[in-house]
Amino acid sequence: MTVVAFSHTGAKMASASGIRAIMDDIAVSTAAAAGGRPWLNLGIGNPAYIPEVAAAWQRLTMAALSENFAEASCRYGPSRGTPELVGAIVAYFRGRYGWDIGAQNVVVGPGSQLLGFIAAALFTGPGPAGGSKLVLPVVPDYTGYQGLVLTPGGIAGIEPVLEPDGGRSFRYQIDFAALERRDDIGMLLLSSPSNPAGRCLEAAEQDRLIALATARDVPLMIDNAYGEPFPCIGSTFVPPAWHPQVINCFTLSKAGLPGERIGFAIGSEAYIGPMVSFLANSALHAAQLAQHTIARALGSGALDTMVASSITPFYAQRRKLAESLLLDSLPASLAWRLHASTGGMFCWLWVDHDWFDDLALYQALKRKRVFVVPGRHFFTSQARPGPSGAHARQCFRLSISAPEAELTDGIGLIGETLAEMG
Ligand code: PLP
């Protein structure tokens, strides 16, 4: 095979992260499932297939296809987003939250992952004032963030404070003192509710992060992929904040359209303007037929209806089921704990024993045709709490969006495997 001479950026971006190798392993194994029992995939990041939500999106797409095809698909358009979608976003956030925003505050992109990438490239890394980093105020957080920086070591995660509740639950707290000591912050980024732990930002925490971003004059990007106003997976959220220092990121992916690749960010013109230019220089713009579909969903109230009558109740029921299955199936003799979750699509488990190793569990479950995601990948390499990263290797994530039978059988086999390992 030809040896390619990569640039520093090339070497970073061409490498497959640990989590990518796991995801490829899951994809290859489940695709090659000839014979034997079907795989139980609790590793997925896909939203659940909810028939009435899929049907609503299909109806809206058909309307866009019949009425907007020529203008949407046969022509290039503006990098900021189609006027229809940008206008619908402005009207929606003005109406729902009273935000005093206009088109200049909005950028639509091909997924929120790319919007995060653009912001990290614009606001972090080597620059005239030296180097700055993408700083995650609390890890574990979304593994995809580790691919957003173009330079090795360009991301730093702050170790969490672990707060066991004495029972089966625990919670991560933000170590603000450690965060505020850092002098290399180029941008702050976190998901709320978080992937993987389902941790929701509290109002006081949000205020303190905004104060820090203001003091350092850096953006605070809040990734609402699972939160308000859609898909609203969870029970309590602080509403997204409108503030000159905050870039709020939203996506349609977890509301049922991950394949259409549409996300958007709202923030001050000083941040959003350069993001639009970056998009123009790289992708030109996001696909426009999907933008028309989403403009219809926002403007007609169809998206709000999907969220309130289907998506939120669906995941609430799934979480209840998953929690009771875990209590019934995981060995009572083990010190396992579930992160107290107020939202999100996952259960995040901590097995507080020295012998436990997330990769060993992954392999043992794979032999039983069950997939979960090892915990270590959700921590940045600099931040693996506990003695030499012990905690990061004692956690794993499972998705509650798998079909109910898969969830039930999969959790049963996790319990069986943990009993064998212990
Ligand atoms: N942010 C978080 C927290 C996620 O979990 C994901 C996907 O799993 C994304 C962003 C990616 O979203 P999008 O499909 O809009 O790129």
Image (tube, rainbow, N blue to C red):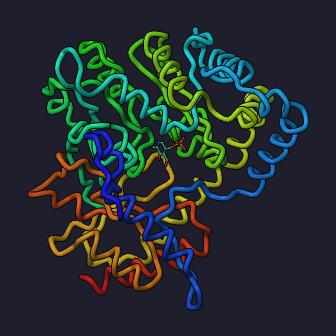
Q: Where is residue 80 in the image (x, y as percent from the top left)?
A: 60, 20
29 to 379, vertically: above or below: below
Which of the 4 image quarters holds residue 302? top right
Farthest residue to the right: give it: 66
**Which image quarter holds the N terminus?**
bottom left
- What residue is shown at x 27% (from left), y 78% (from top)? 333
Farthest residue to the front: give it: 2
Q: Where is residue 375 in the image (x, y as percent from the top left)?
A: 31, 60
Q: Where is residue 120 in the image (x, y as percent from the top left)?
A: 36, 30
The answer to whether residue 42 is left or right of residue 120 is right
Which of the 4 image quarters holds residue 155? top left
- What residue is shown at x 41% (from left), y 39% (from top)? 191
Residue 195 or 155: which is nearer the viewer?
Answer: 155
Farthest residue to the bottom: give it: 36
**Which image quarter holds the C terminus?**
bottom left
Q: Is residue 276 visible?
A: yes
Q: Is residue 301 visible?
A: no
- What residue is shown at x 39% (from left), y 79% (from top)? 365
